[in-house]
Image: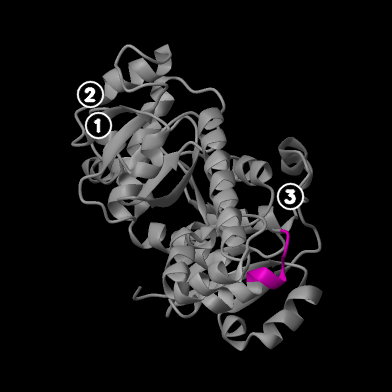
Amino acid sequence: MTEPLTLSIDAMGGDNAPDMVIEGIEASMARLSKAKFLLFGDEAKLAPLLERHPQAAAVSEIRHTDEAITNDQKASTALRSGRNSSMRLAIDAVGSGEAAGIISAGNTGALMAMAKFVLKTLPGIDRPAIAGYYPTQRGESVMLDLGANVDCDADNLVQFAVMGEVFARNVLGVENPTIGILNVGAENLKGNEAVKKAAAMLQETSLPIKFHGFIEGDDIGAGTVNVVVTDGFTGNIALKTSEGTAKMFGEFLKQALSETLMSKMGAFLARSALKTFKMRVDPRRYNGAMFLGLNGICIKSHGGTDALGFSNAIHVAVEMITHSFNEGIKEDYAQLSGNKPMAEKATDSE
């Protein structure tokens, strides 16, 4: 980054806020040389924390509000009554152009509702999607939707595919990402009408994308494709199942390595390999779900994360901004609909 990048932070969102937020900003300074932060939250709580974290203090500005969205607050209620909350004011800063992106560890439903209301959706996008990236046997892949849209039609799935492809290409650095639709089988005859129609549309698209076809649940961890497309109902279940399974195996491994003296000795001898394994599957390294399809960058950090996880969510926002993620979506949709990119339209009209 040549110019300082301003990010908007919901400093009161998350189970461990605001301590975790300030510590996360401090931790992010190791990777960010030019960034500024607008901290929306209770100044009485934030100011003492910044005094203890001088690096974060040097790049942060407090915007006081004593209102915050609770984790159990309904999205509709938050949208109506949370106009002065730390979450809403942080989103407003992106909507006004004062900040380039917003990061929050707060209430997911409220964040989506507010962000969609303030930022609106990109041209060609009917519904924003929640996307997340995760480790696989072949590297990293992205999956969407993870819960924003329970019911999806074929058009929605195609939109998710385009957004996921742009993310994998521009942020994950995959030169020619492959796309797969999650289904109950890989055969063309399986699945509901929405996935069948979406598959046909992707096979016939004019965009230069690699559509793999249908994939099954075990293909997610195998890394069969770079972009996994599904509706929010299925995607959220798949995500929570994989998280729970990973946690279960972690506990099994921990128990097995501590049961006997021999197993403890083996764990000691294998400590370097175990450390590498732990780092590879550490969920904090993949913290930061993206709300794709909004006319602005919005990142949802896990509510229970720590400073390391929140710093990674900040890094995800920076990557999406510096790689002009939303511009890539606009260009692809203009091509998909047979129209010129937005920039060309503006030039033609002048």
Q: Are marks 1 and 2 in contact (CB under 8 Å)?
A: yes
- Asked where in the image residue 112 lies, by quadrant, the reply is top right
Residue at point 42% right, 17% down?
194
Gap between marks 1 and 2 measured at Cα: 7 Å
- Identify whether 147 is placed above or below 65: above
Gap between marks 2 and 3 measured at Cα: 44 Å
Gap between marks 1 and 3 measured at Cα: 42 Å
Q: Which residues are magenta?
A: 15-21
Residue tagged by mark 1?
211
Q: Where is residue 77? Give x, y as percent.
A: 78, 39
First reached walking from the N terminus: tag 1 or tag 3: 3
- Identify whether 297 is placed above or below 339: below
Does residue 148 appear in this view? no
Colour scheme:
one colour
Q: Are marks 1 and 3 in contact (CB under 8 Å)?
A: no
Would you say 297 lies left or right of 147 here?
left
Residue tagged by mark 3?
83
Q: Where is residue 63? Give x, y as percent.
A: 69, 69
The image quadrant where one finds the N terminus is: bottom left
Q: Is residue 20 magenta?
A: yes
- Asked where in the image residue 41 lies, by quadrant, the reply is bottom right
Q: Amino acid at mark 1?
A: Phe
- Secondary structure found at label 1: strand
